[in-house]
Image (spheres, rainbow, N blue to C red):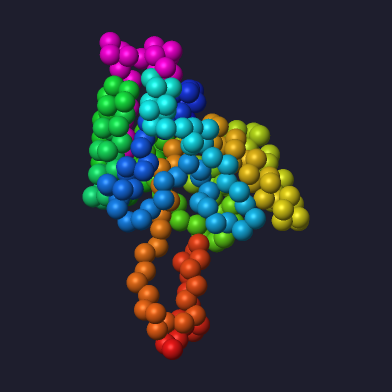
Amino acid sequence: MTKEPLGSSADLRHALSMVIDRVALVKHITQGGELPAYSWMPPGEPGYVPPKLAFASMSMHQRIAMARKILKAAGYGPDNPLQVEILYNTNQNHKKIAIAIASMWKQALGVQVKLTNQEWKVYLATRREKNFQVARGGWIGDYLDPSDFMEQYMSDAGDSNFMGYNNPAYDDLLRKAQTETDNAARMKLFEQAEAIFLKDEPLIPIYFYVNVHMISPKVVGWHDNLLGYNLTRYLALK
């Protein structure tokens, strides 16, 4: 968010997000049963209804057409292509995803993409210094609450806010949620905050991780859950 031209243009960020075919990514690239993502919070949080990106219900054809208009209005085209660098850490799957997204951006919008691979520690330092344009990232919740996903992008969150996101309205809603004792009202505050976050789109959600398990029908006491926790003391063989 501190680098031009994407940092000051939500429209350009939306255009890049719109033309990423999330269904194709999980079907042909990751191939682990992942879920296409059109929100930041994953589905399934009790009492929480994640808002979605505005284009979530549009077809890929509609999304590409709208994105092309956005780039054209911003002055980009064949004679002046948008140039974007994607930073990712060493991992074969990350590489395949970066290549796929670069191809989607090139094919749909004529974007010229440079792929930059760095080892984990160097990559983390680059992100911390905000010396990147677009960087891959991932997050797995530590506990079952929207705050675990949202508070890390408050303006004063430190290194976790690696993209440099800063919106006082977003911060204010999350601070209200920190002191709200009614759970239903608290969830509404988080929903409003995420709606702002998705409108600003400092982060492009592409898919949600899933846990894959093979469970014998003889096992009892196993219950699927968002955190993926099943303590062995509750498991038995019938």
Q: Is any atom of residue 123 visible in this view?
A: no
Q: Residue at x 56, y 37 (%)?
A: 197
**Residue 70: where, in percent of width, then height?**
43, 18
Number of numbered discs = 0
Q: What residue range appears in magenta? A: 69-89
Q: Is residue 225 above or below residue 73?
A: below
Q: Would residue 192 appear left or right of 226 to someone viewing this image?
A: right
Report which quarter residue 115 is drawn in: top left
**Residue 118: where, in percent of width, then height?**
27, 43
Q: Would residue 219 appear left or right of 181 to someone viewing this image?
A: left
Q: Would residue 105 appear left or right of 178 to someone viewing this image?
A: left
**Residue 139: where, in percent of width, then height?**
45, 52
Q: Is any atom of residue 149 visible in this view?
A: yes
Closest to the observer, 10 or 62: 62
Q: Residue at x 48, y 37 (%)?
A: 56
Q: Residue at x 76, y 56 (%)?
A: 181
**Residue 72: where, in percent of width, then height?**
39, 14
Report which quarter residue 84 is drawn in: top left
Magenta span contains residue 70: yes
Q: Quadrant of the C terminus?
A: bottom left
Q: Is residue 22 above or below residue 146?
A: above
Closest to the observer, 50 or 153: 50
Q: Residue at x 32, y 42 (%)?
A: 24
